[in-house]
Image: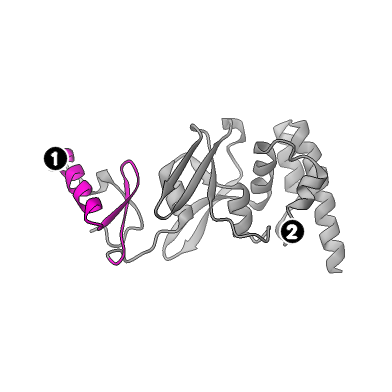
């Protein structure tokens, strides 16, 4: 029943007639025998070779916290905006910050206020999987928002940003302006400068 599910919750196996405690005991046995991988309390995926679909790390991150979306370096790496491979999946949430280490990866959740929780979209990840990921503009501004001193031109330059043709500088400015943050407004000017420099180099 769960073979086609990348990840599933305890309740997925519990019908109205079954005892939830019995389901939990069975899940615990399957984890001990290596049939299941426990990702977090109440969240599981089938182990190899039992699963038919390998869960995408972004899908796992979304499942760990419903009020979250993948952002910052993780989303920027997804868009090819930075040259480095990003092993940790970083998400933004309105819930408490948290770090979760699993056999399938390391997941970090950074807290933001509700008025900054926007600028993401549902994205197709292949194999029938989808996840909420920040737009290129919001991913970069989330990084600035959550990193001390990130409104510094040298900091932004050292990110070695690339493929900035997909970045809408106008949207960056609008997001920064809407936030009312002096830090983000300052960063938006530097981001526009870096985008202009990359465009000039491509001419």
Q: Position of residue 135 (x, y in %)?
A: 62, 51
Per the image, label 1 sits on a secondary structure element best described as loop
User: Tag 1: Cα neighbours inside 10 Å, few (<14), some, or many (≥20)?
Assistant: few
Q: Position of residue 23 (x, y in %)?
A: 18, 45
Q: Which mark is residue 19?
A: 1
- Front residue of 154 and 170: 154
**Residue drawn 48% across the image and 47% down it:** 107
Hey, which quadrant is residue 55 in on the image? bottom left
Magenta segment, which residues? Answer: 20-49
Numbered circles on residues, count: 2
Residue tagged by mark 2? Answer: 164
- Front residue of 154 and 94: 154
The answer to whether 34 is drawn above or below residue 203 in the figure is above
Hey, which quadrant is residue 145 in on the image? top right
Q: Which mark is residue 165?
A: none
The reply, left or right, for residue 120 in relation to residue 185 is: left
């Amino acid at each position: 029943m769960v073979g086609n599910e990348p990840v599933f919750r305890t309740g997925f196996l519990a019908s109205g007639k079954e005892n939830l405690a019995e389901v939990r005991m069975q899940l615990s046995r399957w984890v001990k025998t290596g049939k299941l991988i426990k990702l977090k309390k109440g969240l599981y995926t089938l182990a190899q070779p039992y699963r038919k679909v390998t869960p995408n790390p972004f899908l796992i991150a979304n499942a760990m916290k419903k009020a979250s979306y993948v952002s910052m370096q993780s989303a920027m790496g997804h868009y090819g905006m930075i040259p480095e491979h990003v092993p940790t999946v970083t998400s933004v949430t309105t819930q408490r910050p948290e770090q979760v280490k699993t056999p399938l990866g390391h997941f970090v959740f950074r807290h933001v206020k509700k008025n900054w929780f926007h600028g993401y979209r549902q994205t197709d990840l292949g194999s029938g999987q989808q996840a909420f990921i920040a737009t290129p503009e919001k991913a970069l501004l989330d990084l600035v928002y959550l990193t001390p001193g990130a409104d510094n031109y040298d900091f932004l330059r050292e990110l070695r940003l690339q493929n900035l043709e997909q970045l809408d500088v106008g949207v960056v400015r609008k997001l920064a302006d809407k936030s009312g943050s002096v830090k983000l407004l300052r960063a938006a000017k530097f981001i526009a400068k870096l985008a202009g420099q990359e465009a000039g180099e491509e001419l």
